[in-house]
Amino acid sequence: MPKILVVEDAMALLKAWVKRFSDSGFKVLPANNSQSAIKAAIEEHPDLVVLDLPYTQGQEVIKKLREYKWGNSVPVLFLNSWQDREIFVEYSIGLEDHLPYNWSLQEVVEKAKHKLALA
């Protein structure tokens, strides 16, 4: 069963993520801030990280994850409202993909499945 670290600072949405990913066959590691996300990632070594945090907090999680050998190969899907110019900068810290706002929960689940199939 693939492990997905879901990082969401809105508790109601985090609960929805946990349910949606669990119902789709994933073991979900929930975190509601960058510190708990980093701790969970180090302890559990997730197969995929889904981040929905403010820009600087998400950047902190990605940079910390990339410090570890196992963390270099973990796909990260960042849900955000970045402008294109900011996205290009973030690829330099190991961000493989992002989804701008206006996504649905199901769209993110499908994107996660696709990323895990490629990993």
Image: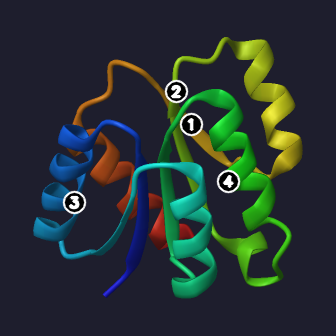
- Decide which of 103, 28 is in the foreground and name it: 28
Q: Amino acid at mark 2?
A: Asn
**CB under 8 Å between callouts 1 and 2?**
yes
Q: Earlier in the sequence, mark 4 or mark 3?
A: 3
Which secondary structure lies at badge 3?
A: helix
| For residue 115, above or below residue 40 | above
Is label 1 or label 2 in front? Answer: 2
Q: Earlier in the sequence, mark 1 or mark 2?
A: 2
Label for residue 98? 1
Separation (CA) of disc 2 from disc 3: 19 Å
Dot 3, how many residues are within 10 Å of its Cα: few (below 14), some (14-19), or many (20+)?
A: some
Q: Which residue is mark 2?
A: 80
Q: Residue furthest front?
A: 35
- Decide which of 108, 27 is in the foreground and name it: 27
Q: Amino acid at mark 1?
A: His
Separation (CA) of disc 1 from disc 4: 15 Å
The quarter of the picture where the C terminus appears is bottom right
> Along the horizontal axis of the image, is 46 left or right of 75?
left
Which secondary structure lies at badge 4?
A: helix
Residue pictured at 63% horizontal, 80% vertical: 42
Residue 78 on image: x %, y %: 55, 41
Separation (CA) of disc 3 from disc 1: 19 Å
| For residue 55, above or below residue 106 | above
